[in-house]
Image (cartoon, coloured by chain):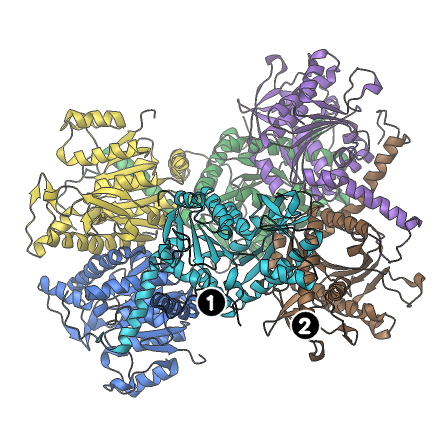
Chain colours: A yellow, B green, C purple, D brown, E cyan, F blue
Amino acid sequence: MATGHSRPDPAKPRIARTMGKARIFTEAMPFIKEYRGSTVVIKYGGSAMVDETLRSTFADDVAMLHLVGIKPIIVHGGGPHISKAMARQGLEPTWVDGLRVTDEATMSVVQSTLAGEINPDIVRLVNAHGSVAAGVNGLDANLFVADQLDERLGFVGSVREVNPTLVSNLVGQGYVPVVAPLARGVDGHPYNLNADTAAAALAAALGATKLVYLTDVEGLYRTLGDEDSLISKITVAGLEELVESGAVSDGMLPKLRSCAEAMRSGVTMAHILDGRVQHALLLEIFTPEGIGTMVVGEGA
Amino acid sequence: MATGHSRPDPAKPRIARTMGKARIFTEAMPFIKEYRGSTVVIKYGGSAMVDETLRSTFADDVAMLHLVGIKPIIVHGGGPHISKAMARQGLEPTWVDGLRVTDEATMSVVQSTLAGEINPDIVRLVNAHGSVAAGVNGLDANLFVADQLDERLGFVGSVREVNPTLVSNLVGQGYVPVVAPLARGVDGHPYNLNADTAAAALAAALGATKLVYLTDVEGLYRTLGDEDSLISKITVAGLEELVESGAVSDGMLPKLRSCAEAMRSGVTMAHILDGRVQHALLLEIFTPEGIGTMVVGEGA
Amino acid sequence: MATGHSRPDPAKPRIARTMGKARIFTEAMPFIKEYRGSTVVIKYGGSAMVDETLRSTFADDVAMLHLVGIKPIIVHGGGPHISKAMARQGLEPTWVDGLRVTDEATMSVVQSTLAGEINPDIVRLVNAHGSVAAGVNGLDANLFVADQLDERLGFVGSVREVNPTLVSNLVGQGYVPVVAPLARGVDGHPYNLNADTAAAALAAALGATKLVYLTDVEGLYRTLGDEDSLISKITVAGLEELVESGAVSDGMLPKLRSCAEAMRSGVTMAHILDGRVQHALLLEIFTPEGIGTMVVGEGA
Amino acid sequence: MATGHSRPDPAKPRIARTMGKARIFTEAMPFIKEYRGSTVVIKYGGSAMVDETLRSTFADDVAMLHLVGIKPIIVHGGGPHISKAMARQGLEPTWVDGLRVTDEATMSVVQSTLAGEINPDIVRLVNAHGSVAAGVNGLDANLFVADQLDERLGFVGSVREVNPTLVSNLVGQGYVPVVAPLARGVDGHPYNLNADTAAAALAAALGATKLVYLTDVEGLYRTLGDEDSLISKITVAGLEELVESGAVSDGMLPKLRSCAEAMRSGVTMAHILDGRVQHALLLEIFTPEGIGTMVVGEGA
Amino acid sequence: MATGHSRPDPAKPRIARTMGKARIFTEAMPFIKEYRGSTVVIKYGGSAMVDETLRSTFADDVAMLHLVGIKPIIVHGGGPHISKAMARQGLEPTWVDGLRVTDEATMSVVQSTLAGEINPDIVRLVNAHGSVAAGVNGLDANLFVADQLDERLGFVGSVREVNPTLVSNLVGQGYVPVVAPLARGVDGHPYNLNADTAAAALAAALGATKLVYLTDVEGLYRTLGDEDSLISKITVAGLEELVESGAVSDGMLPKLRSCAEAMRSGVTMAHILDGRVQHALLLEIFTPEGIGTMVVGEGA
Amino acid sequence: MATGHSRPDPAKPRIARTMGKARIFTEAMPFIKEYRGSTVVIKYGGSAMVDETLRSTFADDVAMLHLVGIKPIIVHGGGPHISKAMARQGLEPTWVDGLRVTDEATMSVVQSTLAGEINPDIVRLVNAHGSVAAGVNGLDANLFVADQLDERLGFVGSVREVNPTLVSNLVGQGYVPVVAPLARGVDGHPYNLNADTAAAALAAALGATKLVYLTDVEGLYRTLGDEDSLISKITVAGLEELVESGAVSDGMLPKLRSCAEAMRSGVTMAHILDGRVQHALLLEIFTPEGIGTMVVGEGA
């Protein structure tokens, strides 16, 4: 429609700059609209958990998601911290098939490191960036109940049962739950869970919309070692093929297996992100181009 | 904290670009946080109501505000449309002190133009941009009850009573109300209201947080005619002084008087924006620099 | 039971008169009991919409229904007003198969007449008689979404989708919705709907108990033109037969077809009433004899 | 407004008759509107409780009030029934100052007559006329707690405390409570209450809008014995004067005193009606002329 | 675990005594846990209803159950009281097949005794022991609707329909309902119900967890007359066999038949207790050994 | 009252034993009644936290309180565990005025011991005894915000602010919160709180009814060292006098001071109990004699 009004000149720098900002907001609109009210379970680990700048931008991202009505839940790991704490106490880690053997003394270190060191630190971090976090560990309200995974590994659990009410109540009250991957064994003893697995099981039990892994790689590659083969989007069936094909590094395998299982149990979408990029979370969720690998259901 | 991880290089263009986006989101965070859940009454008029591009970006902005939890209410005017419709019917407008004399025939045109032409058009516009609008006119549920402003003007009303329940119910159900400034006269007859005044009265009755005027000027000027004297922020007392001082154009006077009155009745903040700038609404509310004149309470 | 009390003499005129009143109330009781809490969609048109006395008694009836807990919804037409408004603007109506061809200019007149002239007038009328009405048109909250009925007719719609939440919310809050039969086309353009059809579609979407047509005839006749063959009660199957038989005037056909369809979709009962009788609505619903033709389901 | 439509002829008998009906409904409208949602406590006794026709029209009236949204509560007496039951058991009533001396044996008859004979009968009566009644006696949920009124009278109580929650819950669930005027003494023993007093105390405790006495007189008279001096409307102050003046029969005194007290405690209006007139209740509440004496607050 | 703390000596009498108390509480824990929130219908009669000490300990038990979150409902009989009241009025009872013939005069005594004598007495009893009771009879809100059981018996009913809403509402509001086994006949007349049957029908209609009969025997015996054959636990099938076998006294038959029927309709468990033992109710429900006969479903 | 029924013989051992049980339940009734729905904050520490039998009976008591509708909240300390953990890591504790100097390294041990070792252990303990516990530390949802108590002590906090919403929400959802006495410093750093003080501050913030200290002494003594001077009941003023008098051991002082302060802030009652007695909690709350020292308000 033609109008006779003299319009402010969009070539002026101030007008141009602000219009640029507006474009980014409106670009994010469909994503905010789609995910508002959704539950997003974030496996938090790697560099994003140790580098001070990345910790800070991660907490900003969580606060931003929370603000626009998305419900973030953080599940953290803590392997390197546990190894350090064991060293401090003169305990020598031993491994079976790449998994840490967890005897009574080790389990005690695992528990105090996850629930007593890392978890409160993340709670403080989130609280300092504008949301209100509440720490939870898998023993609280019997969140995770575990069987023993393998006799040789001791107190390493496989998830038998998830009781997510405590976590969903916290979410409903506006808190950001921060979850340490401990479990109550069916024998009453505390058990250690793999954090990737725990995150996936929690996401499935909550019927989460998204499951996000913050890792120290750019995403998945079609061909291991070929940076140009980064996969931007893959179906869960494609993911399962990739896992079968052997084109996945050993460290990635449990992550991808639990991810596929969670999606088979009702989680809508998963993301494998490079946690070394500042604001990785926000960029993946709020920009059309994304930054990592997105796993979607068959029909999507 | 030093980490041995190789970080992705922020100098790479893709990384740099996405980081820029993230910065804009986080810059908006404190504003989203502050205004989430707030009611914002927007007087919609001028170029923003006639230019197709501006109409479209305005509707985007309303949708974006709505998405992040702000509650927008649109009050529209329609002077130029009314004049055109009168012309189409061969009616000659007459004026007293700059106000349109509204006899029976004119009132009939006013009503059918506001409630039957402009209001449904804005409803369609908003509905096409992702929110769900519901049109309301001041007769519905006796939203506005009016006295006669001046015998010489006929059916021109001054607001006597506002019954905002219908509007606040619509807001509570997630609709964007679009309000035509008609009123039920105490004599039962329909009356015409000044849209600026109606918007201010509604904002006051709802206890709105913000009252926004989309105009065809950049904002208020300290010195009339001096573009460099644009006022970025002013207190309501300052605004009242400015009105008294005579440094305000005649067209602006009713807007500023009703604005000051609304703030004296509990509205927290008012904005006079240049509706000719695309996304004026979003930029004023979500960026630290803003783009127009903000009126704040004494202590702010 | 014999009692020794001296009873007031029912032959005294004052006692007799008041007892007569009481009899009428108690006669109405079973109907009030049956329909309390029910939704009644009333197609309002014809003489009842133009004669001042009938308008007033109609508004009284709506208020009375509302008072005793029935939920009235008014859907109005406006053919004669539209023709007059077109004439005022020098537009010549053209017709195809008895339906008004609605080009862009005509649609503009239709919209401003229905939503800007008739609808607010009915709202004012109801508000003046003790209920609180809220005007709605089919564009609000996408109440009616339409396909094009016939290319030759332009912006004449057939109902594709009804989103009755806005209307049922208004009812739930104690308002009387007054609905103008506009629709949002799937192409985004406003469309005109036949008011009889719109009323029937809304009744079906709301699961209304009753659908009432106020017309300018006494009801349905078994034999067209024979006043003594007025039908007091007919099943929906009987109605469909009547329609097939040709014993129905052309003007009645769309009314009866949409009526039958609404009943097939769950509306319990329909009434075709003579809107020229004062209080037709009240008398049909609250007296055992009724005044028009009642259409009931198979088993009733 | 002139319309060309041929109107049905209102001189035809059928049309005339139905219009008469409609007039009576619309005449009742303002009263229904005013009292909808109000609580009305009805002291039920005298002929209206023993004559079969009056019992039936009373139950119809209660059902009609209930239907249009008024909340009736029935408090009944039972003096004559108690005297008969005592006679059946060979108990001789004795009196002090016109009040029945209630020893242990008499109290037992009082309780079984009120709670076991009259109360269930009224419940059945109301249930047979379309509402759902629930019997309550003053011992239930400690509805009435009593002190001894006078040592010489034995188990005759004066109301010390009313716990109306049980009754208001029943009302809230749509039942019509039927209340027998028993009380729990502070000594734990059952006590007998005067039904007029109990009704007034319950009305006050519930904040009822109306307190209605069904009696065997036409109403109050300005001059005792002069039928033409029937009072149609009196203020509570006027009522108190009348009581002081001695122009009130002894039987009326406790009724009027408790009535004045209830109105001083917040009941809006009281009515003294002739229960010997069929539909007395309905006619008093729904017709402008009423049939008895209405007591109003000072300013009304 | 060894601790250096000097422990208080558990052999000291005070410590020993208090520890004994604690053991009893903890022994009750699993039962409280299991039945908290459950509805328990108690048929109250026999000695427990006439002996003052047993009445008092019964009321204590009801209060204790109520306190820990169990929902007791009391259904009482009244045969001996009715016989006494008939005698007082010179009425001679007649019997057919062991059932009282209930003519009009007898029914009147039954009603006033159950609803006017026994029911209010139990209400007062419970109210004096810390809970708040509300009396109900089967006519209230049409709780029980009855057919005539046998023409020869007159107004003796068999349960045709149970409308338990009034009772479940009272429970939901924290009252203890006390129910008199009257019924509204389908002919509108009051009817007398067998209290055992009424209790069972109410338990079934409410989906109660437990149905408890307080009787004047120790429980069920495998061999009639052999005290050592007291049955502690039996399945409903076993109960039905026992009834068929003839090893049950005539007085017990209707109780056991209605009990079996209630369990077939969803009641989980029934108890036949010796109401002559103080606190029989509490001991049966809160101690592992119990004191009477428990009837359980097949699989329990 | 004489009854003809043959009563079971209360001298029989089985009857005697069960009656004894019943007596204990009914003795507890008034206490259950009084405290049902009340919040009880329990400072858990000393022998009751380390001896296996006492841990188990403590958890039973918590479950029993919970079952009967009392809302227990556990606040634990952990001095000895912290000292042991410091020793394991070769850290030498230093003390100022009897308080542990808490530098960065010590604080890290404090946090991982309280939140990572003791808290999850208590959660598991409670979960194994029939309630569902949820661990919380003072950083979660900013439960405790602290100032530095004394520069010389490092990260030892004094409570500045309590945000009890998270805890009261958990209680409202039926969980037993187990609280570790950490705090967020106003500087963002984690701080250590004295557990007695934290329990008192939380009780005050929640408006708890009771504050219970489980200690390793029998209670308060009038004369220090004289076992016969054990105080059974004392007013808060009496307690304050006792504190001033010097008759209190140094270890008790902070406990008693925070206790007095909590009662001045609205806590109704405090108890100082001997946690070395099995079921100390249950016995104090549910028996008339109690076992420790009860502190009551002035008027109690």
Q: In this orientation, does residue F173 appear?
A: no
Label 2 marks which chain's residue? D
Q: Which residue is mark 2?
A: D157
| Rendered image: mark on residue B279 | none
Q: CA distance from mark 2 to mark 1?
A: 29 Å
Nearer-the-camera pick, B276 or F236: F236
User: Which quadrant of the figure has residue F187?
Assistant: bottom left
Residue B188 in sight in this render: yes
Spot occupied by residue B241 in the image (x, y as percentages of width and height): 57, 57
Side of E140 relative to B215 (left or right)? right
Q: Is residue F300 above or below residue C57?
A: below
Secondary structure state at the residue bearing disc 1: helix
Q: Are marks 2 and 1 on the same chain?
A: no
Q: Please name the amino acid that badge 2 sits on.
A: Gly
The residue that appears at 66% across and 48% down in the rendered structure is: E155
Q: Secondary structure at mark 2?
A: strand
**Is the residue B171 above or below the residue F60 in the image?**
above
Where residue E35 sits, quadrant-wise, is bottom left
> In front here: F19 or B225?
F19
Q: Quadrant of the N terminus of chain A?
A: top right
Instruction: Give the numbered dot on residue E57.
Output: 1
Task: Please state which amino acid type lies under the numbered disc 1.
Answer: Thr
Q: Is residue F92 above or below residue B36?
A: below
Relative to the observer, which residue lies in front, A129 or E50? E50
Give me the chain letter of mark 1: E
**Mark 2 residue crowding within 10 angstroms, few (<14) / some (14–19) / many (20+):** many
In this rendering, the answer to whether E101 lies above or below F229 is above
**Count of marks, rendered view:** 2
**Residue F299 at x, y percent in the picture:** 45, 80
What residue occupies the far front of the structure in this picture? E225
Crowding around mark 1 (Cα neighbors within 10 Å: few <14, some 14 to 19, many 20+) is many
